[in-house]
Image (tube, rainbow, N blue to C red):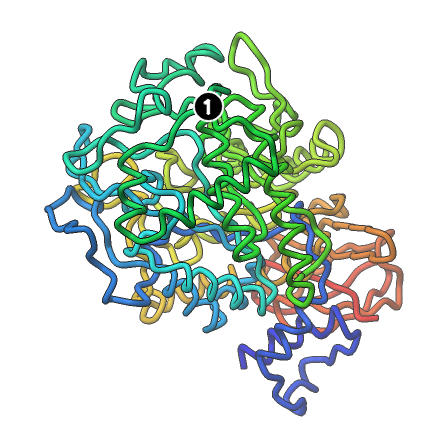
Amino acid sequence: MRNLLIAMSILSFLLSCKKSKKDTDNQQQITSETIEEKQKQVPFVWEGANVYFLLTDRFNNGNPENNINFDRTDSTAVLRGFEGGDIQGITQKVEDGYFTDLGINAIWFTPVVEQIHGATDEGTGNTYGYHGYWAKDWTTIDPNFGTKQDLQQLVETAHAKGIRVLLDVVLNHTGPVTDVDPVWPEDWVRTDPTCEFTTYENTTACTLVNNLPDILTESDEPVELPDQLLAKWKEEGRLSQELDELQRFFDRTGYPRAPRFYIIKWLTDYIHEFGVDGFRVDTVKHVNENAWAELKKEADYAFETWKKKHPDKVLDENPFYMVGEVYNYGISGGRDYDFGDRKVDYFDHGFKSLINFELKTDAHMGYEKIFRKYNRLLHTKMKGKSVLNYLTSHDDGSPFDKERAKPYRTANVLLLTPGASQVYYGDETVRPLIIEGTEGDATLRSFMNWEDLDSIPEIQAVHEHWQKLGQFRRNHPAVGAGKHKRLASKPYVFSRTYTNGEHKDKVVVGLDLPKGKKYLWVKGFFGDGTKLYDTYSDTEVMVEKGQVVLENDYDTALLELVE
């Protein structure tokens, strides 16, 4: 029955052939492949994307045989070692339709490049690079996460279902120094001072934390490749290939062989090879902003080159997408981030969007106050750009609803606030964010609670709510990218409208609705005689006297046109 309801929701939007609930039993079962094919016809806009963010190591173990590599067998602090999640595990969930059913149209997963081999203890307990942010070699995939073939399969599988892929990339630092992972040469990295975060300089020309060597991204001085990297490539039998590729890159671009340009080459190789759709860029404010414009230039070149080589695999005409993590950036600041002594507009240096750290605070306000604020800012200060909203994440120790006591409100705020949305793995399954015995961010990074989803009815009900809102958001660009207007205060009803060329999308949403019979005011937005379909309750209604009437026990209504 679930697949049938999903099919109806999408076909009603795309084919204008909705049926009332009493007619659905007579419909022929529609395959999930048909649903996905129709779904891909919905115009995709990054401004309204529904992005799923997961820790590769903590989501799903698709290949237990790759769980241990490089003698990573030392004991670690709680949740600070590898747990087995991998790229194959993500692909399995794409194939199973998990993301499709959740209304996800883009997946961002933590970096999968080869990590440092050793463990380090910087005050939080023995830790391996399970999270992916401690690069040892940007040119290859860490075997704990999988292989390049696995990544190719993931991208192709996701694209076949209309889902974009975002790679998480790091240009700011290498991995920590350990007994088996030497520091990079001093013309590549600085090892002090540690950042103070009070000025532009002591935020960019410093190490983020102790023992996290900082790439000299501001330098234009040519450098030689580290001996340890050359030796590694030689042992792996690919030294000549890597050197030849670097020669071609620098010959084509004319860039100096400065540290940042090597890494830019290595990062954009994943676009050339696999056709990934975008980058989520880590620690943006800790790198001189010109480097991001340079990364975007090479990413654009790689994306267009890939499209020309694979015209049959191109999803749409959207350019390569870059969203940045400027820690503590908030939408109220508009396009600028203020260092105290200097303001920087990162949107002017390659970024279409920045992660918005403000919604977790705004989420305590009333719905209309939140929606009105974001609608105003996105269509004035931020016009032409966007933000990626979140309520929980992997490194924010003060998320909204850390106790997971308000999963329905979390879904409503996150998925219905204007802008793009970032669902953090487990938001939809009430995965605990407080784990006994952990230190620091580890508490936010437990393994995905699949068993709870399979066995606990209350969690299944929460998950179904996330699915309904997520699918509605994915099927209607108006929800995230459109213009918001309140239609009524009690019960609370609002509209969203999105126009792009010939495509126009109009929806109405009701929240905090009473049980039983409810009257939703739509006058001035949908005229009398207009047929509407409530995807939440699977009900067709008609506008009469400026309103529609629903009778059910749901407190949510998601109304779309029946044309």
Q: Residue at x 64, y 35 (%)?
A: 369
- Give 142 or 111, whichever is nearer the viewer: 142
Residue 197 drawn at (x, y percent) = 41, 15
- Which amino acid is tagged 1? Pro
Residue 418 drawn at (x, y percent) = 65, 43
For disc 1, the neighbor class at 10 Å (few under 14, some 14 to 19, many from 20) is: some
Up-down relation of residue 172 to residue 467 (above or below)? above
Up-down relation of residue 298 to residue 52 (above or below)? above
In the picture as drawn, the residue positioned furthest to the top comes out as 341
Q: Is residue 383 left or right of residue 299?
A: right
Q: Is residue 132 left or right of residue 164?
A: left
Task: Specify the quadrant that holds the C terminus.
Answer: bottom right
Task: Specify the quadrant that holds the N terminus.
Answer: bottom right
- Give 476 or 49, whichever is nearer the viewer: 49
Q: Residue at x 82, y 65 (%)?
A: 543
Q: Is residue 169 left or right of residue 20?
A: left
Residue 75 drawn at (x, y percent) = 10, 46
Q: Residue at x 48, y 40 (%)?
A: 246
Residue 127 drawn at (x, y percent) = 20, 40
Q: Which residue is mark 1?
A: 222
Local SS, label 1 = loop
Q: Give the quadrant of residue 40.
A: bottom right
